[in-house]
Amino acid sequence: MRPDTDLRALVPAPHPDEAPLPPAAVVADGIRLLRGVPYADVPGVRPPELDLWLPPRRPGDPPPPLVVFVHGGAWRRGRREDMGYRMRQWDPGPFARIAAAGLAVASVDYRLSGEAVFPAPLEDLRAAVRWLVRRSAELGTDAERTVVWGESAGGHLAALLALSPGAPALRGAVAWYAPSDLTLQADDPHTPEALLLGAAPADVPELAREASPVAHAGPDAPPFLLAHGEDDSMVACDHSRRLAARLRDAGAPVDLWTLPGADHVWHGLSDAGVEDVFDRTLRWIRQRTG
């Protein structure tokens, strides 16, 4: 080592924007998986990561569209590998099914409310999309045809990502059974919403509004798909109805599916019903990225 070398500049791992990509594992029928890829360097916390599932490709095939998936868990828990308990036993799993349909899918970590309060998780998702755009040529994906898809708390963040100021250009946004108005849980400092905000919504009304997708619905919104169980006992179906109404009033395209007999995370639906809503969602995404 040269005497004038700055050791402090050599010690850190390469920044995710320049770090080599990990080798891809072939998991099934030509589907490749890059697991645990850091996408940002956030001081004081472990680098957030994503898993990237890439569809089979033949020479001459165009780069596939991209789905950015955001997991649920009340902003407090959850794992990027999980799309909800009704799909945990699927073989192949939901992300492999998305890839088999010809779409790349990036399932993204974000800081949970026990690690950092809002807007930290939204900032993480923006950083993930920025990384996916920056490295799209290496990844072989078409970042200009991106849809964001989230479930529960992840659906809330997906909707915010698509609607908030400075949002990336997206072909669509999908939110399954997601909260859309955090001001409704006003006074209790122990709710998931309060833990996300760092205080009861009534005590931070401007922040609660900033964190509510209904406050950002406008004519420039990308096409939205909102799917919600009519019997949801954890996040009332009215959250999706109200967001759909705001989007329509603003002149933005939106599809609203309400499913009779379905509770949160599709509890109460038959296995065939869960398969159907997944397949219909996948078709909706393919129509908007085709």
Image (cartoon, helix red, strand yellow):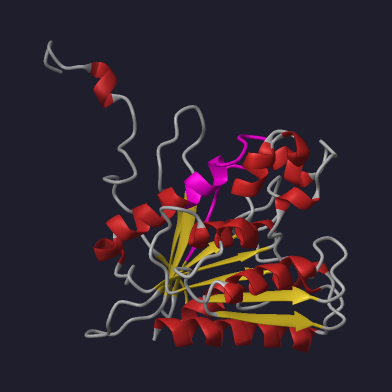
- Residue 194 lies left or right of residue 217; in this view the side is right
Classify the position of the C terminus by image quarter.
Answer: bottom left
Q: Is residue 69 above or below residue 209?
A: below
Residue ID at (79%, 70%) = 237
Q: Quadrant of residue 121?
A: top right
Q: Position of residue 233 (x, y in %)?
A: 88, 64
Q: Position of residue 155 (x, y in %)?
A: 63, 62
Residue ID at (49%, 62%) = 162
Q: Quadrant of residue 4?
A: top left
In the rendered image, the residue lying farthest to the top is 3
Q: Position of residue 211 (x, y in %)?
A: 62, 49
- Residue 228 lies left or right of residue 80; in this view the side is right
Q: Is residue 194 above or below residue 260?
A: above
Q: Is residue 194 above or below residue 274?
A: above
Q: Position of residue 136 (x, y in %)?
A: 29, 63
Q: How many marks?
A: 0
Q: Quadrant of residue 272?
A: bottom right
Front one among 193 and 149: 193
On whether residue 243 falls in the magenta region, the answer is no
Residue ID at (51%, 60%) = 163
- Residue 113 is at least partly visible in this image: no
Classify the position of the N terminus by image quarter.
Answer: top left
- Residue 234 is at least partly visible in this image: yes
> Over which residues does the magenta segment extend?
106-125
Front one among 178 and 220: 220
Residue ID at (56%, 57%) = 160
- Residue 74 lies left or right of residue 254; in this view the side is right
